[in-house]
Image: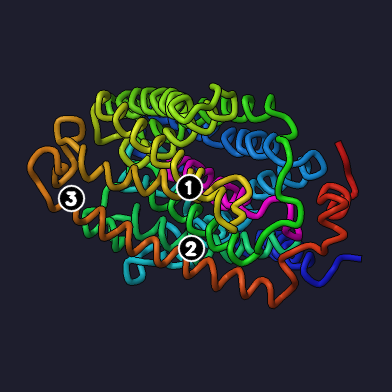
Amino acid sequence: MLTRLSKIPFILLVIAVILTFFFPSIPSGKPIAGLDPADTAWMLTATALVLIMTPGLAFFYGGMVNRKNVISTMLQSFICMAMISVIWVIFGFSLAFGDSIGGFFGNPATFFMMRNVLDGAPWELAPTIPLALFAMFQLKFAIITPALVTGAFAERIRFTSYTVFVLLFFIFIYAPLAHATWHPQGLLFSLGVLDFAGGTVVHMSAGWAALASAICLKKRHEVSHSPAYITFVLLGTGLLWFGWFGFNAGSAMGANSLAATALATTMTASAAAALAWIFFDGVKGRKPSAMGTCIGAVVGLVAITPAAGFVTLPHSIAIGVISSVISNLLVDWRSRTSLDDTLDVFPCHGVGGMVGMLLTGVFANKGVNPAIPDQGLLFGETKLFLVQLGALVGVSIYAFVGSWILLKVTNLIAPLRVSMEEEQLGLDLSQHDEKM
């Protein structure tokens, strides 16, 4: 028997099937004007690259947890690919990129059931690729964001409760931030906030949700353990690094010089952050480790995400180093508190995203991207930095408070935490009746 809670995603799937008969979204068959084959080919590739990041994240997180929780932790990432994809088709794309309602929400009716997407006019900020391709590219960002949160409450959350939280998080946190940041009529976009590929939308929202989750779900009964498979962590890092080129370079929306710049800054920031992490560990008397190298590399990828298409290569190295050292210090600080953010999502993803947003306001350069209205603090202009700082504060409050409320709502529907016995048995067996 399906529990009351686990019926919710199933009901959503049934509704989607029924709606396909009433809203078939049949294209006209007419050619779409203005498309560029090279841009389209690159964005098809970038879309696939971004998708592989979520399985990469599954390995990255799965390798860090206790062996009895590896399958559960990895499945939490994989289920996002299924759930968010269905939600995206029904109303998700429209909620994020539909006609603006107050600069914070898209009209759910604009692209409901992907109406007028297959043969619709290209998105105004991506005029050379099909609208359907733009929709599928943005879907991959929506998939990985709630998956990032899972590292904070790993080893103690009920799977069915998690699926409900994912649904609520997408509707009330991710979609509004995506609309406000990336829609031409979005609130943050209109204020001049720069977020090339997801510093606010992806990493800050996930980071603050992670902090709220760690507080709400409290500590595990068994906190200390050795990572299950460091080889999984290495594999996951490689897949994330590989996919991140699509994440950042794809956000240029075409096969152009800006995409090349974003790819290059992504590479150098991550490399610098990986080195900075293990060198800083060395200063503290620790040996260079595979885990530290991997975490540092991912922190660099996170921090460069909002800045990738706005900064030079030397400045990308600075972003990688600064973010790595700050996150390293915060991970150490967190380990001395009672806060049980299992895989340090907030110190790495949340803080990394915030550092990247602020440093975008320092290093952004019109020579790299002439489309930006203002340059960074380093070039004698203060407006952009203040705008970035304001966005950081506003998004932080919204994401943290909103996630806290959604966690409490989910807990009212059904308990978020597994029982002590289920936790001791391990989530692989207690939640899925499977084991390694």
Amino acid type shown at disc 1: Pro
Asked if residue 1 lies left or right of residue 44, the reply is right
Earlier sequence position, callout 2 versus callout 3: 2
Quadrant position of residue 288: top right
- The label nearer to you, 2 versus 3, is 3
Which residue corresponds to mark 3?
384
Q: Residues within 10 Å of mark 1 (few under 14, many from 20)?
A: many
Reply above or below: 368 against 428.
Answer: above
Name the image colouring.
rainbow
Residue drawn where x is 53% and y is 58% of the image: 211
Earlier sequence position, callout 1 versus callout 2: 2
Which residue corresponds to mark 1?
347
Res 14 seen here: no
- Distance CA(mark 2)–CA(mark 3): 24 Å
Amino acid type shown at disc 2: Ile
- The label nearer to you, 1 versus 3, is 1
Earlier sequence position, callout 1 versus callout 3: 1
Is-magenta flag for residue 145? yes
Q: Disc 2 vs disc 3: Cβ atoms closer than 8 Å?
A: no
